C-alpha cells in the first residue's frame, strides 16, 4: 500500500522557520519526482515545488522561491521542505505528492503562521 | 505561466445526473498534460484523470476526461453521493505547473 505521511507542521511566528517532512512507503522513492502543494484555509491548491528523483532538478513557485528549499533522502524514504521567513500568507495545509501527475498524496500537515 | 480557468464555479446537481466541468488554459497545454483531481471535504486531493483522458487506478468509468490544446472537460455520469466534491484541473506540461481554481459539485 502506498503511503505518504507529512509531519512537522505547527504554529510558528512571522519571520520564523519550519521544516516539513514527508515519509513514504509502498513504493521506491528514488524512482519518482516528488512535489509539495499547499492549500490555504478555504482556498484552492497551489503547487510549491518539484524535485527530481536524484535531486538534480528542483523547481519552485515564485511565491516561495528563495524562502523554501526542497530536499530528499531516498535512502530514508523521505522528502523535506525547509521553510524560512514565514508570513501569515504561508498559513496552509501542506501536502507532499508523488510523480509528475501527483498520483498519490499525503494527508497534509497544517502550518499556522501567527504571532 | 499557463492560467487554468475552471467553469462553472459551482454545479448544483442531483444524484444520477451528469456533471460536465470545463477547464480552459490560457495557452496550449503541451502533450495533453492535463490532470483532474477530486477533493472531498476534509480529505487530501485524489488523482482521477491524467493525460487529459486516462482514468487513474481504481477510478470508476463514470468519470471521463476529454480535450486537447486549451479546452478540457471532465464528465461525471450517474452522479453518486460520494462524487459531490471539489474538482481541480492541473497542467503539468509546462513550468510552473498550475492548478485551476476548482469547481464545486454540490447537491
Image: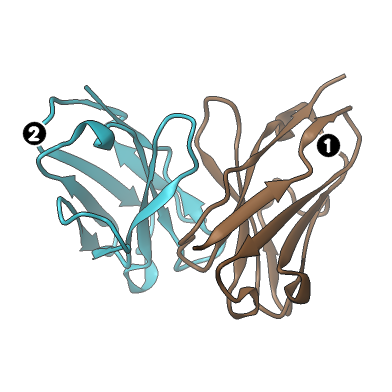
- Binning the other alpha carbons within 10 Å of mark 1 as few (below 14), some (14 to 19) or many (20 upward) gives many
Apparent side of residue B78 relative to residue A17 in the rendered image (left or right): left
Q: Residue at x 25, y 37 (%)?
A: B83
If the image is split into quadrants, where does the C terminus of chain B sit?
Answer: top left
Chain letter of disc 2? B
Residue nearest the observer in this picture, A61 or A12: A12
Q: Residue at x 46, y 48 (%)?
A: B99
Q: Are marks 2 and 1 in contact (CB under 8 Å)?
A: no
Chain letter of disc 1? A
Q: From the viewer's perspective, is the residue at label 2 or at label 1 nearer?
A: 2
Q: Residue at x 22, y 51 (%)?
A: B73
Label 1, secondary structure: give it: loop
When the figure is inspected, residue B69 is found, relative to residue B79, above or below; the finding is below
Q: Which mark is residue A86?
A: 1
Q: Which mark is residue B17?
A: 2
When the figure is inspected, residue B90 is found, relative to residue A113, above or below; the finding is below
Label 2, secondary structure: give it: loop
Q: How is the image coloured?
A: by chain
Q: Position of residue A109 (x, y in %)?
A: 67, 40
Residue nearest the observer in this picture, B18 or A3: A3
The total of numbered circles placed on residues is 2
Q: Position of residue A93 (x, y in %)?
A: 63, 36
Chain B tint in image: cyan
Q: Which chain, by letter, is brown?
A: A
Amino acid at each position: 500500500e502506498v503511503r505518504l505521511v507529512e509531519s512537522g507542521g505547527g504554529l510558528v511566528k512571522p519571520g520564523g522557520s519550519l521544516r516539513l517532512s514527508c515519509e513514504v512507503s509502498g513504493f521506491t522513492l528514488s524512482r519518482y519526482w516528488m512535489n509539495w502543494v499547499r492549500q490555504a484555509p478555504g482556498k484552492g491548491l497551489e503547487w510549491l515545488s518539484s524535485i527530481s528523483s536524484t535531486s538534480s532538478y528542483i523547481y519552485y513557485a515564485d511565491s516561495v522561491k528563495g524562502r523554501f528549499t526542497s530536499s530528499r533522502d531516498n535512502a530514508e524514504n523521505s522528502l523535506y521542505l525547509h521553510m524560512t521567513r514565514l508570513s501569515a500568507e504561508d498559513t496552509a495545509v501542506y501536502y507532499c505528492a508523488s510523480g509528475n501527475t501527483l498520483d498519490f498524496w499525503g494527508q497534509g500537515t497544517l502550518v499556522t503562521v501567527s504571532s | 505561466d499557463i492560467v487554468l480557468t475552471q467553469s462553472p464555479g459551482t454545479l448544483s446537481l442531483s444524484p444520477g445526473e451528469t456533471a460536465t466541468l470545463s477547464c480552459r488554459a490560457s495557452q496550449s497545454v503541451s502533450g495533453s498534460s492535463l490532470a483532474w483531481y477530486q477533493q472531498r471535504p476534509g480529505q487530501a486531493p485524489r488523482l482521477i484523470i491524467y493525460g487529459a483522458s486516462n482514468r487513474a487506478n481504481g477510478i470508476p468509468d463514470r468519470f471521463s476526461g476529454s480535450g486537447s490544446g486549451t479546452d478540457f472537460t471532465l464528465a461525471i455520469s450517474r452522479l453518486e453521493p460520494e462524487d459531490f466534491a471539489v474538482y481541480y484541473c492541473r497542467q503539468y506540461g509546462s513550468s510552473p505547473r498550475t492548478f485551476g481554481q476548482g469547481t464545486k459539485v454540490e447537491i
